[in-house]
Image (tube, rainbow, N blue to C red):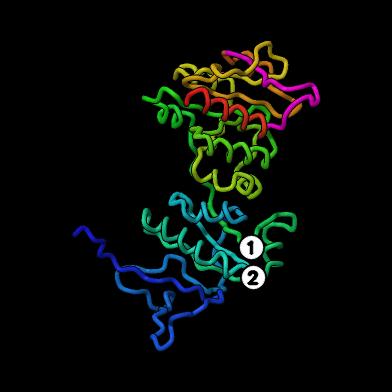
Amino acid sequence: MGQDKRPRWVVYAPMAKRKKQGRTGQRDKRRDFENQPPEGGRDHVRRGSKSAHKGGGNWLYGVHACLAALANPERDVKRIVMASQVADDLELPVVDAANAAFEICEVPRPNIEWRDRRELDELVGRDAVHQGICVEALPLPHPAIEDVIQDAQDRTSVCVVVLDQATDPRNIGAVMRTAAAFGALGVIVQDKHAPDITGALAKAASGAVERLPYIKVTNLARALEQLKAAEFWCVGFDGHADDYLSAKTLQGRNALVLGAEGAGLRRLTRESCDLLVKIPMTDAVESLNLSNAAAIALYQFQQSNA
């Protein structure tokens, strides 16, 4: 009664060294999914191919970033390239991520292309820590600030992160990872100065770019006015502010406005905030790294609304 009748298949990884304990005398039930897809379903990553695929997207790399992209039905994935040295550990997670997206959008992912690690270095650069997996994918749809405002409707406690003069993709990625962890609705940056979602940004975000809107606006001060009109309290973090961040500062709806390390907030951004605060700290250092300051602000927001 109520039992799921859909057909199920066990996926065996042809590149991985699988133990076959307890299979003595049993018929090998593996299928060649690429040539003989079973009726009613299929393995949604077609395996073992080394054929070329049409590209045109951006390269993402790193385990968490790639698995999140494969599982995201909004991602148009062109290629999956993996090092044969990681087959034991990564092939089944890749298949599971692809199947998760297929259940929603019913579009199969491309074949896994098996390569040597050195070939992956050539794809994404020797300095990129790809962990044996790279995914070529088209950019995600561009969200708008109106989307975040819409999501905030009927919610009394919510926050967004606004970054002023943040240009380093790894720093922004780290902020996105923390913002996703603490339930922020999105990260807003100025289009002119902030990077697109690159492999480095996605790697630092550890999958958060697939779950958290990354919103680029033309005018940051105007974006803050839009948030104010939607009843967000815009709190700017400035090391020269008179007031300190406290337990009651970030109650309700908040836009947490942070500047880059050293540069801080621009004058017009500061003037567009409802309140300026600074994080209590000793004079041992002049300022905190952007991602560290964002983590403190987001934690305080969560504690203020617990």
In terms of depth relative to the viewer, which is nearer, 151 or 239? 239
Instruction: Classify 29 as above or below 234.
Output: below
Give whichever of discs 1 and 2 has the lower sequence position: 2
Residue depicted at 21% across the width and 58% down the height: 2
Instruction: Classify 294 as above or below 250.
Output: below
Q: What kind of residue is marked 2?
A: Gln
Look at the numbered disc 2 and give the secondary structure of its residue. helix
In terms of depth relative to the viewer, which is nearer, 236 or 88? 88
Residue depicted at 62% across the width and 29% down the height: 296
Q: Which residues are magenta?
A: 275-291
Residue 137, how many percent across, how many down? Answer: 54, 54
> Residue at the top extreme?
242
Residue 263, how many percent across, how many down? Answer: 74, 25
Magenta stretch: includes residue 289: yes
The numbered mark at residue 187 is none
Look at the numbered disc 1 and give the secondary structure of its residue. loop
10 Å neighbourhood of mark 2: few (<14), some, or many (≥20)? some
Residue 246: name its quadrant: top right
> Residue at the right extreme?
284
Where does the N terminus fall, quadrant-wise? Answer: bottom left
Residue depicted at 54% across the width and 44% down the height: 208
The numbered mark at residue 85 is 2
Residue 88: name its quadrant: bottom right
Magenta stretch: includes residue 181: no
In terms of depth relative to the viewer, which is nearer, 156 or 198? 156
Q: Answer yes or no: do the residues labelled 1 and 2 have beta carbons within 8 Å?
A: yes
Residue 298, how many percent across, how many down? Answer: 57, 29
Q: What kind of residue is marked 1?
A: Gly
Residue 264, how many percent across, how many down? Answer: 71, 23
Tell me the residue that label 1 is attached to. Answer: 132
Residue depicted at 67% across the width and 61% down the height: 123
